[in-house]
Amino acid sequence: MSTPVSTHEAPPRKSPPRKTPKRLRLSAIVMTVYLLFLLVPIYWLTIMSFKSNSEILNAFTLFPADFTFENYETILTDPSWYMGYVNSFTYVALNTVISLGVALPAAYAFSRYRFYGDNHLFFWLLTNRMAPPAVFALPFFQLYSSVSLFDTHIAVALAHCLFNVPLAVWILEGFMRGIPREIDETAFIDGYSFTRFFTRIFIPMIAPGIGVTAFFCFMFSWVELLLSRTLTSVDAKPITAIMTRTVSASGLDWGVLAAAGVLTIIPGAIVIYFVRSYIAKGFALGRV
Amino acid sequence: MQKPVNQRAWILVLPVVALVAFSSLIPMMTVVNYSFQDSFGGNDFFWVGLEWYRELLRSERLWDALGRQLLFSFIILMIEIPLGILVALAMPKKGWLASLCLVLMALPLLIPYNVVGTIWQVFGRADIGLLGRVLTDLGISYNYAQNAFDAWVTVIAMDVWHWTSLVALLSYAGLRSIPSAYYQAAKIDQASRWSVFRYIELPKMRGVLVIAVLLRFMDSFMIYTEPFVLTGGGPGNATTFLSIDLVKMALGQFDLGPAAAFSLMYFLVILLISYVFYTVMVTIDKDEAAQ
């Protein structure tokens, strides 16, 4: 008796779950292949940074046979290397502060009010995000030299505002749009002044948006090379520029180059970890 | 919801306008200035009118670079947009696995551009790189430094590696915002997986996809550092895109006049195409607000 019952009951019970795992498996395969594609080149760079130069050039190994920290030691003890990281961090931090400082009130204005020329102004701001840095390299060099800011951190920070400020306004506007205007009106009726309302109520409410914006300012300032290289020579030279110089000068010290590369990835990885829950919304510029 | 008109909002926008004017308008005016003048070195400039523009429009160098650039941006969009959507659909929806995928996927986006170039430069070399070595061992002749086709494949693979995650993250954010009621309705109608994608997910992702195309188009159109580090624009001029050519002209040869004219035309092309995208985006925003 039990056999026919079980055969009778088996198909309907089986068929719905069978469909889902199949789809899940396909998703898992796509995801795994994609992540492997992303991670293998990074893996290669990382293990290379732990190899000695002779092992890199003479032996082909998937894992360092002779695990060494020599390359990292070179970077962390030589000021011409590690000052590059300090310089990069300095101008990235300056840029993030400046960009957020000017973008916050502007984004509020764009998200709350209509005013004369608002749409044109918004598009004009965006055009600066669209402008190729190559177009600005030479004029920036001349502009910052003429106001004797060449080779300073503030020059690079200001130059990066070219694309970070429009982006910050764009993202913040997206986040602010999601907050109902009734909140502002209630606060004003309760007698809050604009500055008090903005700093005490509004900014805490869009804290995630500010975090995401800071992340993007950090990111685009951190990864940029052309402008930061053009505007610096010695005192403010960023790590990225130091790396290109080393390639062209010796072209041989692969281990140190790889170690320097790995060290530029780490700050980004840490920052991503902190904003991971907002990252998708942030990349959609707050417009989801 | 209609926004009230308030002209005092200009006060709030003023700092941004001042800052961007300083870092964009003033340099831009220098460029405009140079594009109409010539100098024999020093500060001795004289007016040449539209001469540089005429010369550039006749030069094959510019048209070749523009052709390569358009082809590159087109290929990039054709690969990255569908692949990004596919990856977004395949992503786990919640739990620690989703966080892990997000973090790993965002990783390439935060690597400095020249390090991206370095990674692929190393990875593709036949003597010390995994990819180059494996391909050579398989009997495929591959050398991105000498063969133009290989250089293109490597530059495209590098860009797909670098930026597909951006498209995927955007699409993922779009997918996450779809209320589950839509899926339930589709289930009741016994809609196929394809029709769920075609009639629910794709229309709902429209807004973010326009942003993705806009960002990817702009950034691929002004790509500089990655191919510069990887191939230096070579072999020959095979991967000399517009920005690389421009920097060669402006900072390498210091041909201020032609470089300035080049800059302005380059910028105008980007502006024109971006304006179309932007108009589409604003229209979609309005549509969604109306719903």
Image (cartoon, coloured by chain):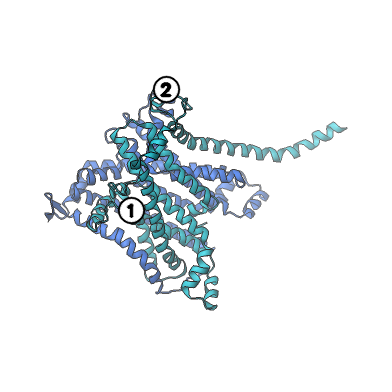
Q: Residue at x 57, y 42 (%)?
A: B90
Q: Residues within 10 Å of mark 1 (few under 14, many from 20)?
A: many
**In the foreground, B76 or A28:** A28
Q: How many marks?
A: 2
Hey, what amino acid is under mark 1? His
Question: How far, Cα to Cα, is label 2 from label 1?
Answer: 42 Å
Q: Which mark is residue A59?
A: 2
Residue with the mark numbered 1: A153
**On the picture, is B41 further left or further right than A148?**
left
Q: Is residue A137 visible?
A: yes
Q: Secondary structure at mark 1?
A: helix
Quarter of the picture containing the C terminus of chain B is: bottom right
**In the image, are marks 2 and 1 on the same chain?**
yes
Q: Is residue B243 above or below residue B128?
A: below
**On the picture, is B290 further left or further right than A259?**
right
Q: Secondary structure at mark 2?
A: loop
**In the foreground, B212 or B163:** B163
Give how far across and how far down residue A214 sits, in percent: 45, 55
Q: Residue at x 54, y 64 (%)?
A: A205
Visual hue assigned to chain B? blue
Visual hue assigned to chain A? cyan
Hey, what amino acid is under mark 2? Ala
Between discs 2 and 1, the one toward the N terminus = 2
**In the foreground, A168 or B273:** A168
Q: Is residue B127 visible?
A: no
- What is the residue that sits farthest to the right in this orientation? A1
Q: Which mark is residue A122?
A: none
Give how far across and how far down residue B67 sits, in percent: 30, 42
Give how far across and how far down residue B30 sits, in percent: 22, 57
